[in-house]
Image (cartoon, grey):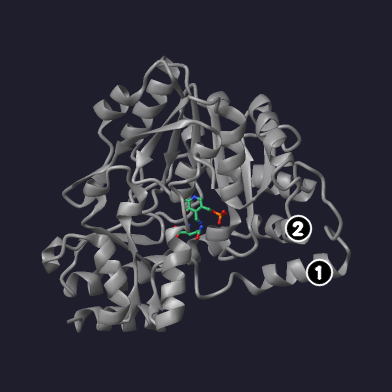
Amino acid sequence: LNRRLAEFGTTIFAEMSALATATGAINLGQGFPDTDGPEEIREAAVRALRDGRGNQYPPGPGVPELRHAITAHQRRRCGLAYDPDTEVLVTAGATEAIAATLLALVEPGDEVVALEPYYDSYAASIAMAGGRRVPVTLRPAEDRFRLDLDELRAAVTDRTRLLLINTPHNPTGTVLTREELTAIAGLAVERDLLVVTDEVYEHLVFDDAEHLPLASFPGMRDRTVTIGSAGKTFSFTGWKVGWVTAAPALVSAVRSAKQYLTYVSAGPFQYAVAEALALPDSYFDGFRSDMVARRDILATGLAEAGFGVFRPAGTYFITTDIRPLGEKDGFAFCRALPERAGVVAVPNAVFYDDREAGAPFVRFAFCKKPEILQEATDRLRRMA
Ligand code: PMP
Ligand code: GLN
């Protein structure tokens, strides 16, 4: 492994899922649903395969049906208008979108300011691009992880190339507020920075929280690369269909990198995701209320088992504090948890440069059947 990647071995998700398989524990580690997405959308994929749509290399930017569906979905949700021909790129999941965007936009030595804890592929992609990550830590305050706007401001230097934002935020479940996003946008405009915003959980916001796309803030449309994915919203994480929307010059840059990573993304699924994005509001509302119910089962159960619980406003993850259990090392705790309780979780420390700051936090996923969540929390309550 070269020096750029030396610090990144196996991802924590693979490690913890392997542990779940080996021990037969309930896997609340890696974030993937245990129920596949809508039947009609699976049928749409089968139809595309059968009708010979997408069985050969699709167009580089993505099939037109999907590009149109992505822009229509964005317009319908937040009134943002993008040109499906020049301002959209379909990618192999959000993961490729992140990698291609950073490879396209970051020069060796450039600084990338990212919220910490950060989704693990951000760090690896910044490294592959030869950039330097500059974390700004979200800190727990009362019931939520907050962005310190002064810290964010202080993190920007003359070497800063871009801000890498994620809302709703994995793993903390924080949904950035209008005030926080206004400040981020103001800083980007003032310092003339590009912003990459990972909004794969855009449909997973609960209670009074509202997902506000960063690209919709004043001065942001043309400096923002927005990343989305069908994996989370439609419960098809295995299809690996994601996308980028941005101004033409930015999309074209990202496309240059994507061409040499995967060239194009798998064809038939693109047609099916185009149909998924056009589902009526009732689908999105139903998905969200299902997930709220699951969050509540897990949050209640974890609190009863003695964890400190940060009730998430978005995503399908709950970050907990293990100190009330008399524990302080999330790594050791997660490695022992399958044996102790028959449950797998993820130590948040892997998402921090400052491992100390992340040590007491552990993440549980709730995109699982209610009875599974119930069983997992029963086991945690009985934990020795
Ligand atoms: N960004 C975030 C914040 C994620 O949690 C994930 C995991 N789904 C991804 C990106 C990757 O998405 P995809 O599976 O579409 O590559
Ligand atoms: N995004 C998922 C999570 O945070 C995992 C995806 C992956 O394994 N790369 O759990």
How far from the left and from the top, in percent, is residue 292? Answer: 37, 65
Whichever of labels 1 and 2 marks the residue nearer the N terminus, that label is 1
Q: Residue at x 43, y 38 (%)?
A: 165
Quadrant position of residue 326: bottom left
Residue appearing at x 37%, y 71% in the figure: 294
Residue 113: x and y in percent read 40, 31
Label 1 – label 2 distance at C-alpha: 9 Å
Please give the residue where the numbered disc 1 appears in the rendered image. Answer: 47
The answer to whether 274 appears left or right of 150 in the picture is right
Using a 10 Å C-alpha cutoff, classify the residue at mark 2 as few (fewer than 14 neighbours), some (14 to 19) or many (20 or more).
many
* Up/down of 94 relative to 325, above or below: above
The residue that disc 2 covers is: 271
Look at the image and tell me in which quarter the C terminus lies: bottom left
Is ligand 1 closer than 8 angstroms to the Cβ of mark 1?
no
Which secondary structure lies at badge 2?
helix
Percent x, y for residue 105? 58, 28
- Where does residue 13 sit, x and y in percent of width and height? 45, 62
Q: Nearer the viewer, residue 221 or 172?
A: 172
Q: Is residue 236 left or right of residue 252?
A: left
Q: Is residue 247 found left or right of 155 in the rendered image?
A: right
Describe the element under mark 1 as helix, strand or loop.
helix
Q: Residue at x 79, y 46 (%)?
A: 64
Q: How many marks?
A: 2
